Image (cartoon, grey):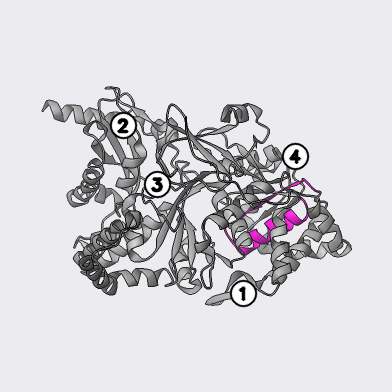
């Protein structure tokens, strides 16, 4: 079994909990800024002293409301400062926050709250409270429902007049690394979500490990980050703790539609995002250039940026000619992209799925180094991340200190170490299945190079075996096709079939701009799906994807679906992963039709 060489994690006192990170900041520099909240057209600084006082006072109110150490307290909200404040307050009270996606249905909410035995929940707004009300008959443990936008935080805080700060510190002081910090339910691409129990140690030690592994990200002058991922997702929760461990200010964006504007006013030095964000940034920039009649200039600049970055691999230096071309590309195009992202971005950490070498090289050529990483809910997010001093685009980097990886005989990635959970809540059978001799089965396939850098090659359960016995990992094809601005989602199929095919959905947000830029009249998604030029454009994306695989793995036929995969139609998880089994079940007639048409065309 191929394994990485372990690097020891940072030493942390066993009595440490997440709130100790805030306490440490308060001892060192209580007046320093740790959060920024939207105010008017800008952002208001919140000092360490302010947030600590708010969190402790809110914790006093929670104690007065009957929240005891170990109790589960739900949070159902978009990403906002109040969520982070609630996390801290719940931890100060010695209790355990349980995140619920704000898009969750009543049945999903009922399962999470009942399985975790949640006793109280903070909802962002009335619509979320209505979902909880529908779920409530199935959650006998639930006593309180508080609505943030109805003044719940102030109301709960006011209840704490009879509870002292010393009472709160006694509760938080009794919590250490081994104690439960949160229960995060997996996205549930198949079956009911499982609740991963993550400890204070998982978060604290792993966050300190990350700060030590990529210090360049946090040591920049004026370092700060803007969080826009859902805080119900493990990646965002880890970032929340990471900002405390690094002592860098963090802002929150609750509406992704305003992300570009928020980046422009907040001006972070680093962000953490999923690959789809980087795809959207690139596609939007390309479409804007096409609409302005500058398509050729943009594509030349993009190709130059990619070539410039490729020349930097393995410590290389671009030649004089390429440096001159890059300078021109920067003056004409690339600097505009940096400015659109706030002008200060130097690093981005990408996780939650494969980014792809093309985008990695493009953004590094623009001046934004994307450090691709890899992790899961069960590993408190990051297992690996690329290092600024040695980025290997196309890999997800080496393990963080305190983490070990191994490649099993069947190619599956196994993990153990400081970030790896120990139990699924109330599910010992699933826990036992997830581990072998202390190694956690990630379910992902991958490789390790001589430097211990990991590369992800696919998902074990998603491997397609064609009628000819060819094993095909669909992710590489899907990611490449989805990179086209007209494509929202792509699902590769072919289990037991003679060849590989694909189901594609149109990106209705990008469609109008693409049509206008190509001199075409506006049309409905249904009309566009039948338009020869639209289909030819997507066929080009399919052809490009096929160049990276063998003939037996290539997509031979494809077609558009009538609608997109969304959270509402239950084809996407709240973390935007495709529920492959659900799509294949419901689209089985479409798949049959696709292969029947292909067979008929070969006979003609």
Q: Between residues 60 and 100, which one lies in front from this camera angle?
A: 60
The residue singled out by tag 1 in the image is 45
The quarter of the picture where residue 518 lies is: bottom left
The residue singled out by tag 3 in the image is 395
The quarter of the picture where residue 551 lies is: top left
Rendering coords of residue 340 (x, y %): 39, 70
Other-residue count near label 3 (Cα within 10 Å), few / some / many at <14 / 14–19 / ≥20: many
Gap between marks 2 and 1 measured at Cα? 54 Å
Helix, strand or loop at mark 2: helix
The residue singled out by tag 2 in the image is 591
Rendering coords of residue 99 (x, y %): 63, 49
Helix, strand or loop at mark 1: strand
Specify whether residue 561 is in view.
no
Gap between marks 2 and 4 measured at Cα? 44 Å
For the C terminus, the image quarter is: top left
Numbered label attached to residue 140:
4
Gap between marks 3 and 4 measured at Cα? 47 Å
Q: Nearer the viewer, mark 3 or mark 4?
A: 3
Rendering coords of residue 74 (x, y %): 68, 49
Q: Between residues 102 and 453, which one lies in front from this camera angle?
A: 453
- Magenta range is 69-94
Q: Earlier in the sequence, mark 1 or mark 3?
A: 1
Q: Earlier in the sequence, mark 2 or mark 3?
A: 3
Q: Residue drawn 71% across and 63% down?
A: 24
Residue 227 appears left or right of 195: left
Q: Nearer the viewer, mark 2 or mark 1?
A: 1
């Amino acid at each position: 079994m191929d394994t990485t060489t372990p690097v020891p994690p940072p030493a942390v006192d066993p009595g440490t909990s997440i709130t100790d990170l805030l306490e440490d900041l308060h001892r060192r520099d209580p007046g320093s800024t740790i959060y920024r909240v939207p105010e008017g057209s800008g952002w208001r600084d919140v000092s360490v002293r302010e947030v600590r006082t708010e969190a402790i006072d809110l914790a006093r109110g929670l104690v007065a409301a009957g929240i005891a150490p170990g109790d589960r307290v739900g949070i159902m909200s978009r990403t906002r400062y109040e969520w982070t404040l609630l996390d801290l307050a719940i931890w100060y009270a010695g209790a355990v926050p349980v995140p619920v996606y704000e898009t969750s249905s009543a049945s999903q909410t009922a399962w999470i709250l009942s399985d975790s035995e949640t006793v109280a929940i903070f909802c962002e707004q009335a619509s979320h409270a209505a979902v909880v009300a529908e779920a409530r008959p199935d959650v006998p443990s639930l006593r309180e429902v508080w609505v943030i936008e109805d003044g719940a935080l102030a109301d709960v805080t006011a209840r704490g007049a009879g509870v002292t700060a010393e009472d709160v510190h006694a509760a938080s002081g009794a919590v250490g690394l081994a104690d439960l910090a949160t229960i995060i339910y997996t996205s549930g691409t198949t079956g009911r979500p499982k609740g991963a129990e993550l400890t204070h140690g998982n978060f604290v030690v792993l966050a300190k490990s990350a700060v030590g592994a990529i210090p360049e990200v946090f040591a920049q002058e004026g370092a700060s980050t803007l969080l826009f991922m859902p805080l119900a997702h493990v990646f965002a929760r880890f970032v929340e703790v990471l900002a405390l461990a690094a002592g860098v200010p963090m802002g929150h964006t609750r509406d992704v539609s305003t992300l570009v504007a928020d980046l422009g006013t907040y001006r972070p030095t680093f962000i953490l995002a999923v690959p789809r964000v980087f795809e959207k940034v690139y596609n939007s920039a390309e479409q804007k250039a096409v609409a302005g009649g500058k398509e050729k200039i943009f594509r030349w600049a993009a190709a130059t940026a990619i070539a410039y970055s490729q020349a930097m691999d393995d410590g290389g230096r671009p030649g004089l000619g390429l440096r001159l071309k890059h300078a021109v590309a920067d003056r004409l195009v690339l600097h505009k992209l940096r400015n659109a992202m706030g002008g200060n971005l130097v690093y981005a950490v990408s996780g939650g799925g494969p980014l792809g070498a093309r985008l990695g090289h493009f953004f590094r050529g623009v001046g934004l180094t994307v450090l691709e990483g890899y992790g899961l809910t069960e590993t408190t997010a990051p297992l690996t991340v690329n290092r600024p001093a040695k980025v290997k685009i196309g890999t997800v980097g080496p393990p963080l200190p305190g983490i070990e990886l191994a490649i099993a005989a069947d190619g599956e990635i196994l993990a153990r170490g400081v970030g790896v959970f120990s139990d699924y809540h109330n599910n010992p059978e699933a826990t036992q299945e997830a581990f072998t001799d202390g190694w956690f089965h990630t379910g992902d396939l991958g490789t390790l190079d001589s430097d211990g850098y990991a590369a992800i090659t696919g998902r074990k359960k998603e491997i397609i075996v064609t009628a000819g016995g060819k094993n095909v990992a669909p992710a590489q094809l899907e990611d490449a096709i989805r990179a086209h601005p007209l494509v929202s989602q792509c699902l590769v199929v072919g289990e037991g079939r003679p060849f590989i095919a694909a189901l594609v959905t149109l990106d209705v947000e990008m469609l109008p701009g693409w049509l206008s830029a190509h001199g075409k009249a506006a049309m409905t998604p249904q009309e566009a799906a039948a338009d020869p030029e639209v289909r030819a454009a997507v066929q080009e994306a399919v052809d490009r994807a096929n160049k990276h695989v063998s003939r037996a793995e290539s997509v031979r036929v494809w077609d558009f679906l009538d609608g997109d995969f969304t959270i509402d139609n239950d084809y996407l998880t709240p973390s935007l992963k495709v529920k492959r089994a659900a799509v294949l079940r419901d689209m089985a007639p479409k798949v049959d039709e696709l292969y029947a048409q292909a067979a008929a065309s070969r006979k003609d």
